[in-house]
Amino acid sequence: MAFFVCKNCGFGSASWYGKCPDCGKWNTLTERPDFAKSSTSKKKEGLKRISITPFKKIKTQDKTRIKTGIFEFDRVLGGGFIPGEVVLLTGEPGIGKSTLVLQALKDIKTLYISGEESGEQVKNRADRLGIKLDNFLFSNDLQAEGIIESVSEMKDQIDVVVIDSIQTIYSKDIEGATASISQLKEVTKLLVTFAKKNNLAIVLIGHITKEGEIAGPKSLEHFVDCVLNFEGEKVSNYRLIRTSKNRFGGTDEIGIFEMTGSGLKEIDNPLVFLEGKKSLEPGKAIVGVAEGKRSLFFEIQTLAVPTVLAVPRRVVKGFDYNKVLLLLAVTRKNLNLSLDNFDIYVNVIGGVSIKGTSADLGLIAALISSFKNIPLPSSTLFIGEVGLLGEIRNTYFEEKIISEGKRLGFKKIYSSKNISSVKQFRSLI
């Protein structure tokens, strides 16, 4: 009996298709004529009993962390790497993932496996950044089984293995193109199993494009222990690193860097994303947001202009698009603003994205300011989540943000402490 398997995603079918029904790729289904025979042989294999161990006999894992020396990076990891931990570092191509890894691991015994750059190219980057790679070993051999076999023989000489990038690694036992879903999953499972058995930290670098053409890293998240997202606009100097999954630490921390000619520079100034808080113009508001245990302050700019289109434009950058639509509806309902005749543009300065809900109040304030063409009072800070009924709610770490705002010189702070509804903006602004 013939069987057809997609080389890209592993989809199986009893009949051939020109286009894979699962991943949508063309001409990727190949025939496996010996499928029935191989299935029968597997059934004849003897049962393999599982090994069972009482929990009281299992030793607690030694959580001595490997610190990188870069505080912003260690912060999001939870204090550093755990031996046996597998970390997936994702981000758009060119955002600075390789630079971050080189700087973070320069003092750690590291095996750097690169499928995208030669050793000379990596060395040239390190020289340009002023990084000494005396603790680094390099390889550009990309077979997963070969990597595991070689690292097993020299694991005492290595603390961390870097795979740059996971899309370039392949397994000899899986048919299909490199970077296909089936290859990515098999390679990742092999590396994760190896890391756990040998207590060796592994960093997998993966690319994500805005077009979503490479969906591999998203399908690998449940295999790994920690998922780090490196984000920021290429036209901006600022980079943020967030944790979306962390089995050995929290997921609420954030690391901030500035990309300079000499590499990534750590940023600990909470006002780094502000151009100036004293002289404000219509449509500009400053919001306070809690990221992990730190308070950050962002500048939100909005522009409301009359439209000639039947359907007004809604252009959003740095804020959740659907949340902006929700806040526009709340504003229209509670303040009777005829926003249907205006194009609305929203932007967060610095090329970053705001994830927290405490910026809701500031966005509405900036929108009203632009609509009425009246600047907000100088040195004013907005903190608060806005509900569907227009109520202002207390947000995570609100007291700490208020305290930090007062320390930094904000003279007026609007929050759930002194404003309960969006309707009060009619008299306050």
Image (tube, rainbow, N blue to C red):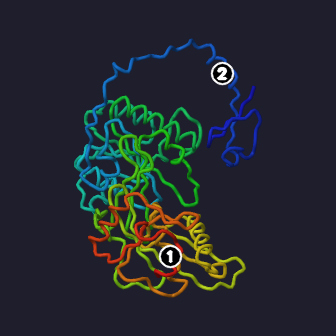
Residue 421, compared with residue 400, is above or below; it is below
Q: Residues within 10 Å of mark 2 (few under 14, many from 20)?
A: few
Determine whether, in the image, residue 149 is placed left or right of residue 64. right
* Callout 2 secondary element: helix
In the image, what residue occupies the spot 38% across and 32% down? 196
Pick whichever of labels 2 and 1 is earlier in the sequence: 2
Residue 205, compared with residue 344, is above or below; it is above
Front-most of 129 and 343? 343
**Looking at this rendering, what residue extends furthest in the bottom direction?**
373
Q: Residue 429, how many percent across, how many down? A: 47, 82
Q: Which residue is mark 2?
A: 39
Determine whether, in the image, residue 304 is placed left or right of residue 64. right
Q: CA gap, disc 2 to disc 1?
A: 70 Å
Q: Residues within 10 Å of mark 1 (few under 14, many from 20)?
A: few
Front-most of 356 and 158? 356
Q: Residue 263, how many percent across, how many down? A: 30, 63
Q: Residue 189, how many percent across, how many down? A: 48, 35
In the image, what residue occupies the spot 55% across and 71% down? 316
Q: Residue 382, how many percent across, how many down? A: 42, 72
Q: Which mark is residue 41?
A: none
Residue 374, compared with residue 7, is above or below; it is below
Q: Quadrant of the N terminus?
A: top right
Q: Which residue is mark 1?
A: 424
Q: Quadrant of residue 233?
A: bottom left
* Callout 1 secondary element: helix
Residue 342, compared with residue 268, is above or below; it is below
Number of callouts in the render?
2
User: Which residue type does callout 2 highlight?
Assistant: Ser
Q: Quadrant of residue 259?
A: bottom left
User: Which residue type does callout 1 highlight?
Assistant: Gln
Front-most of 338 and 145? 338
Mark 2 or 1: in front is 1
